[in-house]
Image: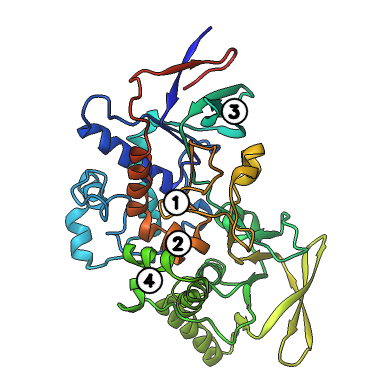
Amino acid sequence: MPQFPVFDVLGVGFGPSNLALAIAVSEHNATASPGQAVTAHFLERQPAFGWHRGMLLDDATMQVSFLKDLVTLRNPTSTFSFLNYLHQRGRLSDFINHKNLFPLRVEFNDYFEWSAAQLADRVSYRTEVVAIAPVEQDGAIAHFDVTSRTADGELEVRRTRNLVFATGLRVNLPEGVVPSARIWHNHDFLARVPALGDPKRVVVVGAGQSAAEVTAFLHERFPAAEVCGVFARYGYSPADDSSFANRIFDPAAVDDYFGAPDEIKRRMMGYHSNTNYAVVDTDLIDELYRRVYREKVLGENRLRLLNLSHVTGLAETPDGVRVTVESLATGRSEELSADAVVYATGYHEADPTPLLGELAGRCLRDPDDRLKVDRDYRVTTSADVEAGIYLQGGTEHSHGISSALLSNTAVRVGEILRSVLDRRPAAIPSQQEYAISGSSSS
């Protein structure tokens, strides 16, 4: 019967969060004493590393400093830093002369891909986790068996002492909105734009950064088209990125939030939601306003912002979509014939519990039925579960706004790795293996 390794860490998903964890593990192993190395592998259903591909607009910039990369706040000397990436790409001097803390989003994605390529042996792409089962040892759950399916349909089983979920976000659409060839979420934006051809009108629903970026892009890309932005607010609201407000993204803010009573947590979230949710960079707001004003002067009115409004009806026709927009102020409705409707209505956090199967019942929940999560991002479980389940995402309720954002990624993965190391059994055979017939491991 073939033998297979027991991993210390098995990551589900390989976006920026688990990529940062893979780097932290690699750097730990480079200096670890014999027997202290951490074995880790990651499973990703995408065919290659990808980060918000649908919104990698040419001129879209990051909303966080380049210093909040995958490593710097944890290890400023890391060779995986954005600065070293620039050096390797031959752009370090050019970037310095640019005098900008905020790189292009497409450039930061290239940095992620550059980092991921160096750890390709730690990840299995085109591999989807389909089941997780507990493994008992001496009356306790000491391991998890993770079954995954490859693109060829082959089932593989891997055993691990710890799971780290970083499965990203799921698109959020209003109730009753069904995606189609003409109705999209902005997650798929760039992939769908070529199919527009030469549109006469496109409707964009939403008031956040993505909605504003999509609106600006369409208005510039299709100079003969009318672009209608629909949102319930009076206007786009600016993001509060002032120096003091940005402290909410500091690593220390996680401690403040985690230790606060529930009422204070709610107040903190209310005070600072305008740093991250449904807000837009001031420069982009100013640019859109300039365009609207210029068109009023010229008598074009090709960029229409339907504020204090919401979409109350969608009906697809052979030639497009009939969109009913109702004013919240007057109750009057207007019908728009559009070639496409783009919903930039955000995301919601993925729930890992369906994958956990019977293990989900051993994960404790708070009075609001949310997973209880310890400070080290480990799900609180019943006493018989010794193996760890960690979350990179889905922890806003316990750890605050910054808990799953890029701002805190480097520090977060360091805390998770330290937790894994601190909880390791006193003695682990360096080549511990297990046997499962009919399975394979990569």
Cβ atoms under marks 1 and 2 closer than 8 Å: yes
The image shows residue 49 at horizontal and vertical percentages of 45, 41
- Residue neighbourhood size for the residue with mark 4, other residues' Cα within 10 Å, grouped as few (<14), some (14–19), many (≥20): many
**Residue assigned mark 1:** 377
Q: Within 10 angstroms of label 1, few (less than 14), some, or many (20 or more) residues?
A: many
Q: Which residue is mark 4?
A: 248
| Residue at 52% from the left image edge and 92% from the top image edge | 297
Q: Nearer the viewer, residue 274 or 131?
A: 131
Among numbered discs 2 and 4, the one appearing first in the sequence: 4
Work out how far the residue at label 2 is from the one at label 4, CA to CA, in angstroms: 11 Å
Snapshot quadrant of residue 7: top left
Q: What secondary structure is marked by label 2? A: helix
- Say what secondary structure mark 1 lies in: loop
Q: CA distance from mark 1 to mark 2?
A: 8 Å
Give the vertical position of 202 relative to 167 (above or below). below
Picture layout, residue 77 above or below residue 431: below
Query: What kind of residue is marked 3?
Result: Thr
Few, some or many residues within 10 Å of mark 2 (<14, 14–19, 20+): many
CA gap between label 3 and label 4 equals: 38 Å
Picture quadrant where residue 129 is located: top right
Whichever of callouts 1 and 3 sits on the residue coming sooner in the sequence is 3
> Of the residues tagged 1 and 3, which is closer to the observer?
1
Which mark, residue 399? 2
Q: Position of residue 102 (x, y in %)?
A: 32, 65
Asked if marks 2 and 3 touch (Cβ < 8 Å), the reply is no
Residue sitting at the far top: 1
Q: What's the coloring here?
A: rainbow
Element at label 4: helix
Q: Could you tell me the amino acid type at mark 2?
A: His
Q: Amino acid at mark 1?
A: Tyr
> Can you identify the residue that label 3 sits on?
147
Residue 430: quadrant of the picture: top left
